[in-house]
Amino acid sequence: MTLIDSHCHIDGEQFDVDRDEVVQRAREAGVVAMLNIGTGDPHSDDFRRAVAVAEKYDNVFASVGVHPHDAKLYDDPAEKHLIELVKSSKKVIAWGEIGLDYYYDHSPRDVQQAAFRRQIRTAKELGLPIIIHSRDADDETVEILKEECSYDGFRGIMHCFGGTPKMAEDLMAIGFLISFAGNVTFKKAENLREAARVVPLDKLLVETDCPFLTPSPFRGKRNEPAYVTHTAEFLAGLIGVSVAELAEQTTLNFTNLFRLDAGRFA
């Protein structure tokens, strides 16, 4: 059985002491690849660090893009810096996480929307799939994605899905994969489980979003890519398929999305 953690943050300081061991534990658990998502100040070395982690490990890839929390920092120099990182490394395979976060509002909402649209267009120019973050902004997220992404060939992931079944259906209709994290295992997350039930296997991904959202039975501990196996097992039981079938299909979904050779993960 092979799994891919479609969204993690193992370049963060939480993993500075034991990053090699974390990657090794993931391998031993059957996690054959990880997409490490860069975040932080686009004028700093935050994203360079994320790419460096991907370069160090053969089974780790990277994504760059300014999170909605930091949308107020997205400007011409920031964009240039991130584009240079994309062009400097074949391990950068996606742009994100980008989107809207109306729960914290760390950046003004109009600024978030402008940065979101601008980054979608930059990703298009670079031919990269996008990784979407959306919190308390379901309608606006879907509206922008419909306006900016509704054409053949555009690809992306709605990461750590937290919306309604209708939002999932709307996103799948314009070509997005839906990724679930460890919070789908939480006792009070029936709304997420309702959404997971409408996502067919060929549109599904799994992730950790580590070090956050540690799945049951490890809540309270730091999350890490090896724990994606627990989310996969939970989802398989929820939708009525074997863990092996879910693992095989979600791995194929990931490799197809990013146009990677599936044979390297066999």
Image (cartoon, rainbow, N blue to C red):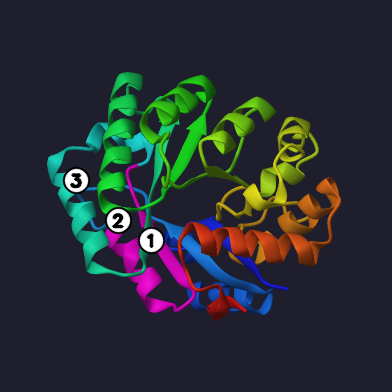
Where is mark 2, residue-wise?
A: 46
**In front of the other: label 3 or label 2?**
3
Magenta-span inclusion, residue 87: no
Q: Secondary structure at mark 1?
A: strand
The image quarter in which residue 206 lies: bottom right
In the foreground, 21 or 53: 53
CB under 8 Å between discs 3 and 1? no
Residue 93: assigned label: 1
Return the disc, 1 or 2, that comes first in the chain's sequence: 2
Q: CA distance from mark 1 to mark 2?
A: 17 Å
10 Å crowding of disc 1: few (<14), some (14-19), many (20+): many
- Gap in Å between the C-alphas at discs 3 and 1? 18 Å
What are the residue bounds of the magenta stretch? 47-66
Residue at point 68%, 43% (across, down): 183
- Relative horizontal placement of residue 75, taking residue 219 as reference (left or right): left
| Quadrant hosting residue 113 | top left
**Residue occupying image coordinates x 60% and y 55%:** 208
Element type at mark 2: helix
Q: Which mark is residue 78?
A: 3
Residue 21 in view here? no
Residue 120 placement, left or right of 166 = left
Which is more N-terminal, label 1 or label 3?
3
Residue at 63% x, 48% y: name it: 203
